[in-house]
Amino acid sequence: MSARRKSIAILAIATVLALACWWLVDRHAVAGHAPPAQHAQRSSPAVADPAAARTSIRASNIAAPDPDPDAAARQSDCMHDRRAQLQHRRAQLGSPATPDAAIEYAFLTSLSAPDMAPGETARELTAASERWPANVELAWLAAHHCPRAACASAWRHLAALEPDNAAVWLMAMADTTRAHDQAGYEQALQRAGAARVYDPHDGLVFLHARAVLAALPVPERCRTPGQLASLRQELGRTPTPDDWADLESVNTEAALGGADHGGLQGCRPAAQPSGTRRQDCIALLSLVASGRTLLDQALALHMLLALEPDAAGTSQLRERYRRVRWLIRQTRLARGIPPGAVIQQWTQGEVATLQARAIAEGRWPPPADWLPDDVR
């Protein structure tokens, strides 16, 4: 797990429980603990507006921090109680007997440890993937959290299960970049560009984490009047136990799930891709631009605008980019979170969910004269 992802999980989950108002701001912007070597470069290539890499589930700019000098101590108490719950559940679960139980066990290992136990979690996922080699979810998670020495074998195993998934080859591109394997990178890029689908399994972590967290009561020391008031202000309604599980789970997804965009470094305009590499980059980015998240679409479309040589194609890309940026703008302006919106986002797709809400509220399509700040 990268330093940024690990920090997001630790900070976001802690604050969700203790302050009850923290929604993920930027899944690649929080620095923290030293990362495992294999994920040291895990990040997204630069986007002109950092907001293009933000999710729609975000921190509130309205809810004020708790002024009580004892707030930090209460936060520590809250997290202590939550970790104790998770550790107890892990002990109850025992040795996993099914792939789903193995995933739950690994998540419990991660979420119940103060440092998220990246090494132990990786070992558990690797062992489970070896035990159930045909299970795609386990193979994906094992490759996503592999120890550096095992990453190549992990993504190759995943590629055997999903050979036409560009997200798998994007993972391979990131790994060969870290290994300074230029030939391996070009081969992985070629396979990614020739793939037929792009599926980074977004929502996989969220749904599994939510199954774990929704079964546990919110610790009493987390449910202070101030914390409940902050969450009520953020949601625009009275919070339910489902909201607590949703908040924790979406931040776990951000920290432990999603695509490894670090492999796109070789497709940046600054890398000046040409010839076959340029064409492979365009093909891959076109697939990523069909992804279900704001991050995938905004990042890929922004990069495609710098690579696409065709004027007609550029015009279409510009309009798609404008629409995605409009949706990002709506996430900043929206107030309140409708019941069920978080689960909908991770089952039906972030972009589709946001667009449906914008339509319902009369904010779609974007005005014809509206342009993003970084219009090309």
Image: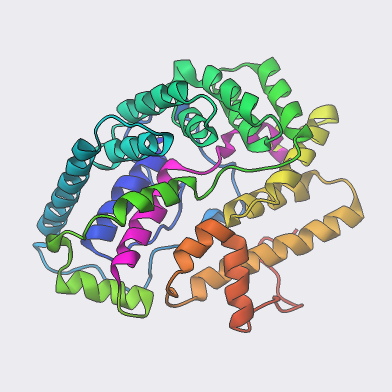
Q: Residue at 11% of width from left, 53% of height from top?
A: 77
The residue positioned farthest toward the front in the image shown: 97
Q: Is residue 248 magenta?
A: yes
Q: Is residue 158 left or right of residue 103?
A: right
Quadrant in which residue 163 is drawn: top right
Q: Magenta segment, which residues?
A: 240-269
Q: Give x and y (percent) for residue 374.
A: 67, 60
Residue in front for this viewpoint, 371 or 16? 16
The residue positioned farthest toward the bottom in the image shown: 362
User: Looking at the rendering, in which quadrant would you find the C terminus?
Assistant: bottom right
Residue 125 in view: yes
Q: Is residue 188 above or below residue 329?
A: above
Q: How many marks?
A: 0
Q: Give x and y (percent) for residue 70.
A: 8, 62
Residue in front for this viewpoint, 348 or 335? 348
User: Looking at the rendering, in which quadrant would you find the N terminus?
Assistant: top left
Q: Give x and y (percent) for residue 275.
A: 85, 29
Q: Residue at 12% of width from left, 61% of height from top?
A: 221
Q: Give x and y (percent) for residue 251.
A: 39, 52
Residue 51 in view: no
Q: Is residue 232 left or right of residue 356?
A: left
Q: Is residue 5 above or below residue 145?
A: below
Q: Is residue 242 magenta?
A: yes
Q: Is residue 122 above or below residue 17?
A: above
Decide whether the magenta segment is chiefly helix, strand or loop: helix
